[in-house]
Amino acid sequence: MKKLLLVLILSVGLAGIAQTETETTTKNESAVDRNFYFGIGGTVQSKYNLDEKLSNANLPTLNTAALELVLGWNVFGEKFSGDYEIGFFGSQNDTGNNKNRIMGANFRLRTHYNFVNKEKVAFTGGLNFAYTVNQVDVFSENATIDMNNLGTNNVLTIRNEMVYAGPSVALYVFKDKKFPLRVNLGYELALTRGRWKSDFSGINNTIGESGNNRFVFGITLL
């Protein structure tokens, strides 16, 4: 329910940008560009508090950098712009026979003011708002599943959810061409505790990821 509510809020926010620009540009008799886009992005996490627990157990720590495939909807008007974006990411790390894998998704809303808006290029800046879902699996590469004794299998699967917000900028190039590009950079502050939990069992001595901020970047084809 919380996930659906947050996605709805982000969608309403972007729709509000589009409506504001429509009203503004109608007066100025100029058009608002709306289009879907895709590209690659990534995040660089300052750190994971979970790494301390993993390291103490001689298990591989998480990769702090992850690439993602992004899909989104962009709105660009005379003075304001914004987009709603979904990104899917995953990475894997190993130490000896032990491995971990982190997978997840980012739901992101950007609201920007257009500082430069020319025919061929534009530069915008504003805020990022993001909701992130992470899942971590820890397992052994040479483990064997015994179907007659399933109780001996030892695989850790945990997840958390985070909310971020922070400043961002975007550079649009080749605006007048058939395949315009956008490069975006941002820094997102972790606003929630992000405690690790499991859907399958209780967790003692769990920890969260509050205060662990991250850099965000992306290159998209509009």
Image (cartoon, rainbow, N blue to C red):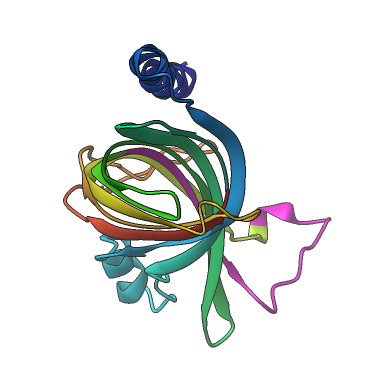
Residue nearer the viewer, 39 or 45: 39
**Range drawn in magenta:** 129-151
Can residue 137 be seen in this snapshot?
no
Q: Is residue 164 magenta?
A: no
Residue 197 placed where, x, y %? 40, 41
Q: Residue at x 37, y 43 (%)?
A: 203
Residue 44 drawn above or below residue 222: below
| Horizontal relation, residue 127 to residue 12: left or right | left
| Most distant residue in the bottom direction | 96
| Horizontal relation, residue 175 to residue 187: left or right | right
Residue 90 drawn above or below residue 70: below
Residue nearer the viewer, 216 or 95: 216
Residue nearer the viewer, 171 or 139: 171
Residue 106 placed where, x, y %? 46, 44
Q: Residue at x 58, y 48 (%)?
A: 222
Residue 61 placed where, x, y %? 39, 73
